[in-house]
Image (cartoon, helix red, strand yellow):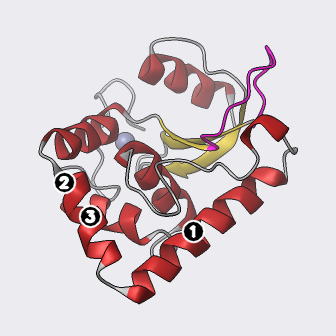
């Protein structure tokens, strides 16, 4: 993670990024798309969302899906397929294992993000995990990304930021 990454993150978030451990996924142009965040922020706050979606176009795309009531559809698809149910539970466990490398925080023990392992509550968190882990790890995150108007393969960064 470079000073340039931190500067882009600050613009993406509109505030200084807190507790950032590294860049977990990037735009094709190289800008951060997902950050890995410490499970306990510098001020002591427990922070379960280890993979945090920062890219404005990506977050807007996930907000649009949520507004379009895609979450109940993705939940129904997942619940209809025993393999997807299992995969979603494994995604939850992997998420917790990834985060545990950076410390155990009792307040959020067993709590991942986005509604895992049995619900669909935040597409931003699920898409962030899917982008960080790559296809085939988080089936609901993958499905959200496949429906999104944004793609990690096409740079939608503001012109002054795209590298
Ligand atoms: Zn870009």
Say which label, 2 or 1, has the lower sequence index: 2
Disc 1 C-beta below 8 A from ligand 1: no
Residue matched to label 1:
91
Q: In this view, does 66 lie to the left or right of 113?
A: left
Q: Is residue 138 magenta?
A: no
Q: Can residue 80 be seen in this view?
A: yes
Residue matched to label 3:
74
Which structural element holds mark 3? helix
Q: What stretch is highlighted in magenta?
A: 39-50
Mark 3: few/some/many CA within 10 Å (<14, 14-19, 20+): some
Which structural element holds mark 1? helix
Residue 110: % across, % down = 71, 53
Q: In which quarter of the image is ligand 1?
A: top left
Mark 1: few/some/many CA within 10 Å (<14, 14-19, 20+): many
Q: Is residue 4 above or below residue 133?
A: above
Disc ID at residue 70: 2
């Amino acid at each position: 993670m470079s000073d340039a990454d931190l500067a882009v993150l600050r613009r993406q978030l509109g505030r200084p990024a807190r507790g950032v451990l590294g860049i977990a996924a990037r735009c094709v142009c190289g800008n951060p798309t997902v950050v890995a965040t410490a499970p306990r922020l510098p001020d002591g706050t427990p922070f379960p969302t280890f993979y945090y979606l920062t890219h404005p176009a990506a977050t807007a795309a996930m907000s649009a899906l949520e507004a379009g009531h895609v979450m109940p559809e993705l939940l129904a698809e997942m619940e209809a397929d025993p393999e997807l149910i299992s995969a979603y539970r494994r995604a939850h466990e992997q998420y917790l294992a990834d985060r545990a490398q950076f410390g155990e925080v009792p307040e959020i023990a067993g709590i991942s993000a986005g509604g895992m392992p049995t619900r669909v509550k935040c597409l931003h968190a699920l898409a962030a995990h899917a982008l960080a882990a790559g296809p085939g790890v988080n089936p609901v995150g993958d499905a959200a990304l496949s429906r999104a108007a944004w793609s990690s393969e096409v740079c939608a960064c503001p012109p002054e930021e795209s590298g």
